[in-house]
Amino acid sequence: MWWSKEMEETPEVRNELVDRIINYMRLHAYEIYDEPGEVNIVYIEGMNTDGTLNDDRKNVFNDIRLVFEYKDNVPIITGIWEGTTEPSILWTERPMNPGGAARIKFGQYQAWQVGMHGHKIKHEALVQTGGLVSVHRDLNKDYIRTGDKIDTGYFGINQHWGYDLPREDLGSSSAGCLVGRTKNGHQKFMSLIKEDPRYKADKRFIFTTTILPGDEIN
């Protein structure tokens, strides 16, 4: 299993968290992959790595990225890291799209393939080349989804690292992507998901990812 140094929660807490996630996913009829080695990638907004909620302040790595899979028919979390599902202040105030910064719509999408993220300096990531994603366009720059126009398409909503930035500042790391804060954690995330037998059989395999609101995971 891949665990970051920031994590101190007990196996009991982890088991309880994965049970809550699965219950929520079943309630919303989301796909759950339960064959040996198949990974389920989940981001939870406004949640700490110990499963507790936080105030979900803007411009903070206060969301989680996690992977769970089934072993001996039992779901277990095999990796969990600090991350963000939200654009930073920088890219909200100076959006790349004239319609406003992208804030991903909660839900499940089959849209990502292993590829490279970045411009001058690239790193391995999950890139949005396999399917459409829906986002809320924060045109009024209020940092919430309520009332925002929903836009669906290929927007480069990649899953990449956060350049080891401090937890309290997203900097330029996210314009709407799904970001794991640390380079080391991201590399372990990539190593973990690439063990999925579906990816091993087909390097063009399209990964599914689920984005959930933390305050509804109970």
Image (spheres, rainbow, N blue to C red):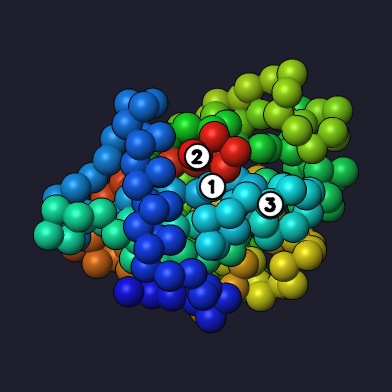
Q: What residue type is labelled 1?
A: Ile
Q: Tag 3 or tag 2, which sits nearer the N-term?
A: 3
Judging by the rendered image, the residue that carries numbered circle 3 is: 54
Compare residues 75 and 125 and report the one nearer the observer: 75
| Label 2 Cα neighbours within 10 Å, binned few <14 / some 14-19 / many ≥20 | some
Residue drawn 38% across and 74% down? 2
Amino acid type at circle 2 is Ile
Percent position (x, y) of residue 81? 52, 65
Q: How crowded is mark 1: few (under 14 residues within 10 Å), some or many (20 or more)?
A: many
In 3D space, how far apart are the residues under numbered discs 3 and 1 (Cα atoms)?
Answer: 11 Å
Residue 62 or residue 119, whichever sits in front? 62
Q: For mark 2, give the secondary structure.
A: loop
Q: Which residue is drawn at 48% across and 69% down?
A: 9
Q: Is residue 103 shown above or below 37?
A: above
**First in sequence: mark 1 or mark 2?**
1
98 to 186, vertically: above or below: above
Q: Is residue 191 left or right of residue 34?
A: right
Earlier in the chain: of badge 3 and badge 1, it is: 1
| Separation (CA) of disc 1 from disc 2 | 9 Å
Pointer 1 with pointer 2, Cβ within 8 A:
yes
- In the rendered view, would you say 117 is above or below 207? below
Which residue is identified by label 2? 217
Q: Residue 147 carries which label?
A: none
Q: Mark 1 points at which residue?
A: 44
Tell me the CA gap for discs 2 and 3.
Answer: 13 Å
Figure quadrant of the N terminus? bottom left
Rendered image quadrant of residue 143: top right
